[in-house]
């Protein structure tokens, strides 16, 4: 079946697929990697964001814009008090 999608949406879909195929560029230095490898962070965060769609990660955007964010801020922007 052939779908018609305006090019704007095709590009957005392409970007999402591309993001899922690549790891977040901050992963090697991100506290989420440390917490995950230490067994302190549920794998879903790493799967859904770091190895999934990192373009929707709040930490990613704060890092990109050089804004402060605490180490225990989760990818959705919430604070994990147990980290
Ligand atoms: S938590 Fe966000 S900034 Fe950190 S590695 Fe994962 S996607 Fe990248």
Image (spheres, rainbow, N blue to C red):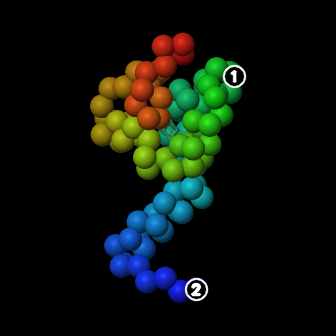
Q: Secondary structure at mark 1?
A: loop
* Quadrant of the drawing holding the C terminus: top right
Q: Is residue 17 left or right of residue 42?
A: left
**Residue located beneath label 1 in the image:** 39
Neighbourhood count class around disc 2 (C-alpha, 10 Å): few under 14, some 14–19, many 20 upward: few
Q: Is residue 3 left or right of residue 35?
A: left
Q: Please state the horizontal and vertical placement of residue 56, each as a whole percent of the image.
A: 43, 46
Question: Which percent across, then down, holds residue 70?
Answer: 40, 21
Whether residue 28 is visible to the viewer of this picture, yes or no, is no
Please give left or right for residue 20 compared with residue 76 in the image: right
For discs 1 and 2, the disc positioned in front in the rendered view: 2
Mark 1 crowd level (few <14, some 14–19, many ≥20, 10 Å Cα): few
Q: Residue at x 65, y 34 (%)?
A: 43
Q: Residue 79: image x %, image y %? A: 43, 21
Badge 1 or badge 2: first in the primary sequence = 2
Residue at the outermost top position = 82
Q: Quadrant of residue 28?
A: top right
Q: Which mark is residue 74?
A: none
In the figure, 82 relative to 2: above or below?
above
Q: Residue at x 53, y 86 (%)?
A: 2
Q: Which mark is residue 1?
A: 2
Asked whether the viewer can see residue 61, the reply is yes
Look at 37% across and 25% down and name the residue there: 69
């Amino acid at each position: 079946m052939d779908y018609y999608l305006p090019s704007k949406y095709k590009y957005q879909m392409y970007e999402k697929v591309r993001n899922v195929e690549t790891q977040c560029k901050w992963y090697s230095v991100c506290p989420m990697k440390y917490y995950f490898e230490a067994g302190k962070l549920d794998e879903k965060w790493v799967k859904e964001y770091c190895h999934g769609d990192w373009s929707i990660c709040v930490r990613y955007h704060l890092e990109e814009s050089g804004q402060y964010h605490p180490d225990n801020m989760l990818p959705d922007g919430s604070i994990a008090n147990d980290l």
